[in-house]
Image: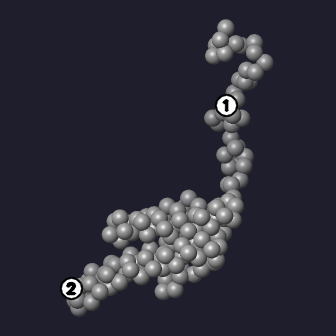
Amino acid sequence: MSQYDYDPESPYREPYGSSSYGYPSYGQQPYDQPYGGYAQPTMSPSEERTWGMLSHLIAIAAMVLSMGLLGFVASLVVYLVYKDRGPFVRAHAANSLNVQLTMLFWLILSLPLILLLGLGLLVMIAAPIVAFVLHLIGAIKASNGEWWDPPLTPRMVR
């Protein structure tokens, strides 16, 4: 008999109803506990600094690749995935999302201003540049482990 054959008499056989790796079978998980009975994992301070920095850098990359339109999606994804992992990464991801939402507001506001005054073009060019600079400063601050609230941005997401 090879190692891959099923042996019902083996002492290493799992009892009926259990599954591999110690996870409960379908329907056996209590509703009031997270999966596996463990809380959400927390990050080390260096991981929090890294993800705080990446929350700004990923938003910059998405902004550049999509000409300023999809940077908020990158910030939103980082915020939703990592907001419960630590307070530092949550603050920087929220700041990144706030910068992106403010920039999106200014871009939308610039469209009617183009038709009315011609100033909208200036706003449309300045908004991504300001967001780029704020994200760059935020990435540097997060890399250094410093808390930071970006200027010129209201705190819509906390």
- Identify the residue at horizontal 72%, vertical 24% (top origin): 14
Q: Give above or below for 42 relative to 31.
A: below
- Identify the residue at horizontal 66%, vertical 15% (top origin): 3
| Count of number-bearing discs | 2
Query: Judging from the image, what secondary structure is the residue with disc 1 in?
Result: helix
- Which residue, given by chain and number where applicable, does mark 2 sit on? 115
- Identify the residue at horizontal 32%, vertical 85% (top origin): 123
Question: Residue 51's x, y, as percent?
Answer: 58, 64
Question: Residue 126's x, y, as percent?
Answer: 35, 84
Question: Residue 158's x, y, as percent?
Answer: 58, 74
- Which residue, given by chain and number where applicable, does mark 1 sit on? 20
Which amino acid, mark 1?
A: Ser
Query: Judging from the image, what secondary structure is the residue with disc 2 in?
Result: helix
- In front here: 139 or 20? 139
Q: Is residue 98 visible?
A: no
Give the quadrant of the N terminus.
top right
- In front here: 50 or 87? 50
- Identify the residue at horizontal 56%, vertical 68% (top origin): 53
Which amino acid, mark 2?
A: Leu
Q: Residue furthest top?
A: 1
Q: Earlier in the sequence, mark 2 or mark 1?
A: 1
Q: Find residue 83 and report its image quarter.
A: bottom right
Binning the other alpha carbons within 10 Å of mark 2 as few (below 14), some (14 to 19) or many (20 upward) gives few
Report, in whole angstroms, how far the alpha carbon at label 2 lies from the one at label 1: 64 Å
> Left or right: 91 with respect to 61?
right
Q: Give above or below for 54 relative to 99.
A: above
